[in-house]
Image (cartoon, helix red, strand yellow):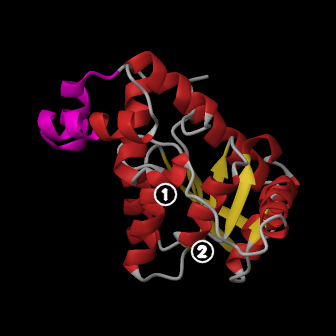
Amino acid sequence: MIRVVIADDHHLVREGIRALLEKADDIEVVGEAADGEEAIAHVERLVPDVVVMDIAMLRLNGLQALERVRALGVATQVVMLSMYSDDAVVRQALQHGAKGYVLKGSVSEELLLAIRAASRGATYLSPTVSDTILGDVSGSPSGARAPSAVEQLTPREQEILQCITRGFTNGKIAEAMGISIKTVERHRTNLMAKLDAHNLVELIRVAVKQRLIRLEE
């Protein structure tokens, strides 16, 4: 039996994934997490075979939580869930140690395939994602390319960017992350520079266009 933890900050999404997985005879859902910190706690306590992890969550986003899982040294594998097929995001997830990348619009049999592959130590990518990665490789003989906006942002900057789009003030972001307001302001300045945005509206517009964030549903 493949023991799975579901990590997503939307309750209805978690319910949908659980309903799908519970139909499989070889998969058991042993826990649910609403954010990255809770996901890490479940991994430490339950040591599941696979974590199905949303890439955009508060407190710790999916990539940060993935790094923490790998640092624990456990055998738990991670399958990332995302709304976006941007090749830079996929590459970043794989570089962080993800064993799967499934688009949220494809949460069906694909997710079951990804979980089973990850439990064996194999890697599964949604077909759309695979085509994007292969297309990028075949179109670039030298393999060299300029880093995209996603790759220029640190995990902390990505997390703060998500908070900004949700209307969090600097003070609220600082309180939620346990950092100073000055540190938040410095991250905001870095975000503006990296994304070539001159104000908050431009920052959000660029972030949406580059698929760096997920707007609330």
Dot 1 surroundings within 10 Å: few (below 14), some, or many (20 or more)? Answer: many
Asked if the residues shown at circle 2 and circle 1 are in contact, with their CB atoms under 8 angstroms apart, the answer is: no
Residue 72 location, x and y as percent?
Answer: 38, 77
Q: Residue at x 21, y 39 (%)?
A: 186
> Element at badge 2?
loop
Image quarter (top left, top right, bottom left or bottom right) of the C terminus: top right
Q: Estimate the x, y position of residue 166 in percent, counting from the top left.
A: 43, 23
Q: Quadrant of the N terminus?
A: bottom right
**Residue 117 is covered by the magenta coloring:** no
| Residue with the mark numbered 1 | 63
- Would residue 208 be found to the left or right of residue 62 on screen? right
Query: Does residue 185 belong to the magenta stretch?
Result: yes
Residue drawn at (65%, 58%) of the image = 90
Picture disc at residue 106? none
Relative vertical location of residue 2 with respect to residue 163 in this rendering, above or below: below
Q: Is residue 87 above or below residue 124?
A: above
Which of 47 and 84 lies nearest the eye of the viewer?
Answer: 84
Q: Tell me which amino acid carries mark 1.
A: Leu
Find disc 2 in the rendering and name its residue. Answer: 49
Q: Amino acid at mark 2?
A: Asp
Examine the image and state in which quarter residue 127 appears.
bottom right
- In the picture, measured across the screen, residue 160 lies left or right of residue 24, that is left
Comparing labels 2 and 1, the label whose residue is closer to the camera:
1
Residue 86 lies left or right of residue 50; in this view the side is right
Q: Kindly tell me whether residue 178 is visible in this rendering.
A: yes
What SS does tag 1 mark?
helix
Question: Magenta span covers which residues?
Answer: 168-187
Rendered view: 12 above or below 72 = above
Q: In x, y percent, where is residue 216?
A: 55, 24
